[in-house]
Image (cartoon, rainbow, N blue to C red):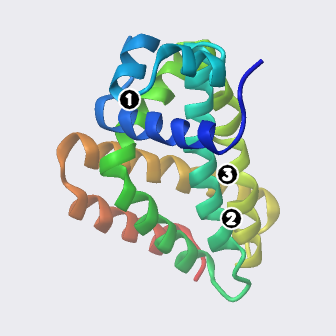
Amino acid sequence: MTGAGPARDRLLQTVVEQLAGQGIADRSLRALATATGTSHRMLIYHFGSREGLLTEVVATVEAGQQAALAALTADPGAGPREVVDRFWVTVSAGARRYGPLFFELSAQAMQGRAHAARLRETLVAPWIAPLGALLERGGLAPAAARTRARLVIGAARGLLHDALVTGEFIEADAAMADLTALALPP
């Protein structure tokens, strides 16, 4: 049985911060424990295993981004461009810190790693519904809104990848501004 409560939540956030800075690679549970100032026994108590810990890291990273989008789409007066532009600012601001971890976990999901399997279900589909609803609110038909939502999600992630690899965040910002102007209703 895994532990629960505030101590677990603090430990999980410490691990997320550590992995954001150093990556996952093939780091052992003992190495993660040392790097985060705890013992491997405490990590096992709270998360069950390395895979259990990494599964929780995936859930935490994804939940943070989904919460940010939900907060922005909740404003009934905000149009699609405004919401996507504000979301881009939020996501790209954190990308320098969390982007490499996000893409490392995404690659592990593509490789079929058990701890990243959840991303197969959470990386695309849960994003299409709120963004699609926002685009419908902006005047697009439901099928077109879902397709456009997928386009924006894929393009935004591609631009984040580009910026992280090249360091050209200003250029990625300009490209995202062009995308929103071309692809989204006001």
Residue 66: image quadrant is bottom right
Q: CA distance from mark 2 to mark 1?
A: 34 Å
Quarter of the image for the C terminus: give it.
bottom right
- Count up the numbered dots: 3
Q: Earlier in the sequence, mark 3 or mark 1?
A: 1
Quarter that holds the N terminus: top right
Q: Position of residue 14 (x, y in %)?
A: 45, 39
Q: Marks 3 and 1, how far apart in space? A: 35 Å
Residue 116 visible in this rendered orientation of the protein: no
User: Which one is nearer the viewer's eye here, 165 or 180?
Assistant: 165
Report whether residue 50 is seen. Answer: yes
Q: Residues within 10 Å of mark 3 (few under 14, many from 20)?
A: some
Amino acid of disc 3: Trp
First in residue order: circle 2 vs circle 1: 1
Q: Residue at x 42, y 12 (%)?
A: 30
Assign a secondary structure to mark 1: loop
Q: Residue 8: which disc?
A: none
Q: Callout 2: 10 Å neighbours few (<14), some, many (20+)?
A: some
Picture disc at residue 127: 3
Q: Nearer the viewer, residue 94 or 183?
A: 94
Question: Marks 2 and 1: CB-CB under 8 Å?
Answer: no
Q: Secondary structure at mark 2?
A: helix
Q: Residue furthest bottom?
A: 77
